[in-house]
Image: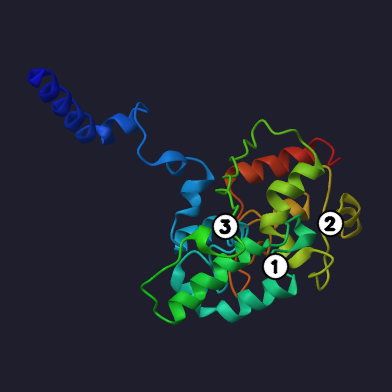
Amino acid sequence: MKKHFVFLAVLGLTLMGCSYPMEELGLFKTGGLEIKGFSKFQNEKVSFDVVKSTALSTCLECHTSGGRSMNTAEKVLAQKDAILGAINKGSMPPRSAGYQPLNACEKQILETWIDDQVRSRSDVQKVGELSNCGDAEAPVQKPETDLATLELSFENLKKEILDPKCMVCHSTETARRTILETVADLQKHNLLAATAEESVLYQVTVPGMNKRFMPPQRGNTMLAPLTEAELSYMKRWIEAGAK
């Protein structure tokens, strides 16, 4: 009887000591539901990484270089008033480019992080502790589009290339002159021709083909140039009839 008791005691201590590796294997869970799903996201502290994956996720599709870059904490804090003003006004993210406004949780995450930085707080709140984020789920990462196999259409061209690279200046809300919202707009401004090399829309996105280069690599609206895959897609769309 005594030997049986000692064996059970040793077994219990062994299981307790092995809880971490067994948990990793999915055989023994010490944290309940908190180790996976949105509960884990709610336990994340409001850090710049969380801000980038939520409130600034759509902004970072465009603002990765130039005067309005938001890819570092320092750059975001330097223009915090402009960012918050545009978000509260509803002008950012731009709806004309197909983006949805920030929800209440995303706004609160951004505002909380900025306030923590300004006040140099060391006791940082968790996402789930914010009043608007009690049911927040972890953001879903947008899968990268394979432009080589994507169907050729203006809708896809606009969504994958024009929206993130051009519409910040060429939408109905922002354009001073040239609007790129529809194929009719492109034709109206004589941006399309039979071949890509003859089309101004393509010429201005290839270094050295036109006296202008888009997106502009100077000023506050400087965006990343089109990639080889994006240029190839635009060329193929134009030469397939630009439909």
Element under disc 2: loop
Answer left or right for 135 relative to 115. Answer: right
Is residue 194 placed above or below 203 in the rendered structure? Answer: above
Q: Secondary structure at mark 3?
A: loop
- Which quadrant: the C terminus? top right
Q: CA distance from mark 1 to mark 2?
A: 18 Å
Residue 197 visible to the viewer: no
In the image, 10: left or right of 46? left
- What residue is at 84 percent from the left and 47 percent from the top? 193
Q: Residue 116 appears at what percent x and percent y? A: 45, 75
For residue 54, which numbered disc appears in the image?
A: 3
Amino acid type assigned to the residue bearing label 3 in the image:
Thr
Towards the viewer: 150 or 110 = 110
Front disc: 2 or 3: 3
Q: Residue furthest front?
A: 1
Residue depicted at x 44% and y 76%: 117
Q: Quadrant of residue 58?
A: bottom right
What SS does tag 1 mark? Answer: loop
Residue at 35%, 26% (x, y): give it.
27
Q: Which residue is nearer to you in this view: 137 or 171?
A: 137
Q: Between marks 2 and 3, how big is the CA–CA gap?
A: 27 Å
Looking at marks 1 and 2 on the same chain, the residue that comes earlier in the sequence is marked by 1
> Which residue of the protein is positioned furthest toward the left in this rendering?
3
Q: Of 159 and 126, which appears nearest the observer?
A: 126
Corner quadrant of residue 44: bottom left
Q: Position of residue 10 (x, y in %)?
A: 13, 27
Look at mark 1 in the image and give the residue it sits on: 92
Estimate how packed mark 3 is, as few (under 14), some (14 to 19) or many (20 or more) residues with alpha carbons within 10 Å: many
Of marks 2 and 3, which one's residue comes earlier in the chain? 3
How many C-alpha atoms fall within 10 Å of the one at disc 1: few (<14), some, or many (≥20)? many
Query: Pointer 2: what residue?
Result: 181
Question: For the N terminus, which image quadrant?
Answer: top left
